[in-house]
Amino acid sequence: MNPVYNFSAGPSVLPKKVLQTAASELVDYRGSGMSVMEMSHRSALFEEIIRTCEESLRRVMKIPDSYKVLFLQGGASTQFAALPLNLLSGNRKADYVVTGQFSKKAYQEAKKYGDIRLAASSEDRNNTYIPRLERKDFRPDADYVHICLNNTIYGTCWDYLPDTGAPLAADISSCILSEPLDVSRFGLLYAGAQKNMAPAGLTVVIVREDLIGKALPYCPAMLDYKIMADNGSLYNTPPCYCIYMAGLVLRWIEEDMGGLEGMKARNEEKAALLYEYLDSQEYYRNPNEKRVRSRMNVTFVTGDAALDAKFAAEAGKAGLLNLKGHRSVGGMRASIYNAMPLEGVRALVEFMKRFAAENPKK
């Protein structure tokens, strides 16, 4: 049987070693006679799981002690509301940069809660670039500035961090744990875990302590960062199994991948292999500026919608799954997150060569 490679943008591929460990502990977690799925979140066993997971995340990402780590539910999309409800505590102003679908949704949601300004957008060129911004482009009295660091749908990523003056908040759902990140440059980071970290169901928020405890009066308790921080992410039942899985992934990164430095090198090698092929021929095209190409989500088109559809269908039959681009942009998208092996990218490039040879354009 030929190997199967899952290029889904999320929920996405998980490390095989992690899945094997989870399978071995599924019915009986470390002699407890229980699965993690069925144990109390107030038990000593689970308290150890969540504590170890947070300690590992702090160690891997080098999170300063002045930041709180929250394990939440609701997906990154819930943070589109939680963020302004917690951080619009001063002038009720925030600036947003729109570089893709999710940053646009975050901007539209935030407008319900205060004076939200569109500082810049890349929509004029179909989100194929990242605006070059300086401090003068942001309001000096903004409570925060929001960006999405990696754009899953369009396949771009920020190649620099703007000087904002105000605290910088970033959605890092599709690039968390893919390379080192200076957490101290941000006031807040948030991520849905289902791309690089764990199964769907867990959302991680990393927030500087001085930014919490000032939520708007009508902020729901479930979205209040201080309530969640004060309760150690156990205000209500958390996504227990996802937290357990995140802990296994973090252990894999530390013990097998050489931490985030090793993870970055691995991801750069995979992305370089695919982009070098794309740049060497004319059958496929990547529309994005080279300096902002994502290392997590590689988009490409043939220029013929029928050929694109045939490519995705035949790739699936060849064991290269979920390569169809997002419905809003079409084409193809190869999500090559942390757990995608180099062999998977090699198999994709070979298939691309074969498909181009067998399906000449008219």
Image (spheres, helix red, strand yellow):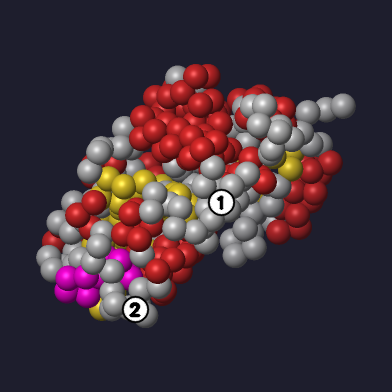
Image: 222 above or below 34: below
Q: Where in the figure is residue 252, as x and y percent of width and height?
A: 54, 25
Q: Quadrant of residue 21?
A: top right
Q: Where in the figure is residue 94, as x and y percent of width and height?
A: 25, 69
Q: Where in the figure is residue 18, as x and y percent of width and height?
A: 63, 29
- Range of magenta residues: 84-94
- What is the tally of numbered marks visible in this picture? 2
Around disc 2, counting alpha carbons within 10 Å, would you say few (fewer than 14), some (14 to 19), or many (20 or more)? few
Q: Closer to the N terminus: mark 1 or mark 2? A: 2
Q: Where in the figure is residue 188, as x and y percent of width and height?
A: 30, 53
Point 61% across, 25% down: residue: 342
- In the rendered image, the residue lying farthest to the right is 1
Image: 326 above or below 262: below
Give the numbered dot on residue 65: none
Image: 114 above or below 99: below
Point 45% across, 69% down: residue: 105
Residue under label 2, please give it.
218
Whether residue 117 is visible, yes or no, is no
Question: Image check: 337 left or right of 149?
Answer: right
Residue under label 1, please give it.
239
Question: Image check: 261 left or right of 270?
Answer: left
Mark 2: amino acid: Tyr
Q: Is residue 246 magenta?
A: no
Question: Image check: 113 left or right of 204?
Answer: left
Q: Quadrant of the N terminus?
A: top right
Mark 1: amino acid: Pro
